[in-house]
Image: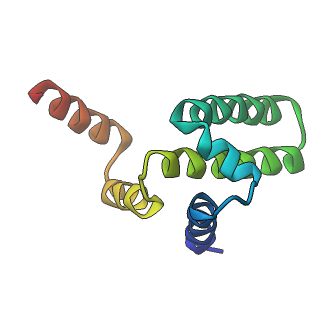
Amino acid sequence: MSDAVLMRLAATIRERRAAGADKSYTRELLDGGARRCGKKLGEEATETIIAALCEDDEALRAEAADLLYHLLVLLESRDVRIGEVLEVLDARMGMSGLQEKANRQTMADRT
């Protein structure tokens, strides 16, 4: 398994957005805009945390999958491509988390 599954899911979400009058759960979320998509992502994040702390691995995997789906929907609502996010992650590879955070803070200080 690779990032290909994320790319395929993102493409499906994009197709659902472009679909005509066909209603789907994805389309309903996207029609609600970034605010609705963000709220749903927050709910899924909470459910993922609860599963991590209180439930078995199967429940955690299911909630994590829901979380990733809703993240992709939120990204689509803002017209941000998963490939762009993966590029950011790729650029961070080999860099410690502390170094990466320091670099972000430096960039924020410049603005």
Tell which residue pokes out farthest to the front in this image.
21
Q: Nearer the viewer, residue 70 or 57?
A: 70
Toward which corner of the image does residue 111 lie, by quadrant? top left
Toward which corner of the image does residue 40 lie, by quadrant? top right
Toward which corner of the image does residue 101 lie, by quadrant? top left
Residue drawn at point x = 60 percent, y = 67 percent: 15
Q: Quadrant of the N terminus?
A: bottom right
Marker count (numbered)? 0
Location of residue 100 with respect to 106 vertically, above or below = below
Residue drawn at point x = 73 percent, y = 52 percent: 65
- 82 left or right, relative to 73: left
Tell which residue pokes out farthest to the top in this image.
109
The image position of residue 72, as x and y in percent, is 57, 52
The image position of residue 37, as x and y in percent, is 60, 37
Location of residue 2 with respect to 13 vertically, above or below = below
- 110 left or right, relative to 26: left
- 56 left or right, relative to 31: right
The image position of residue 55, as x and y in percent, is 89, 36
Location of residue 39 with respect to 93 vertically, above or below = above
Q: Nearer the viewer, residue 87 or 52?
A: 87
- 39 left or right, relative to 54: left
Residue drawn at point x = 71 percent, y = 35 percent: 44
Q: Nearer the viewer, residue 83 or 38?
A: 38
The image position of residue 46, as x and y in percent, is 71, 28
Colouring of the image: rainbow
Q: Nearer the viewer, residue 30 or 67?
A: 30
Residue drawn at point x = 60 percent, y = 43 percent: 31
Tell which residue pokes out farthest to the left in this image.
110
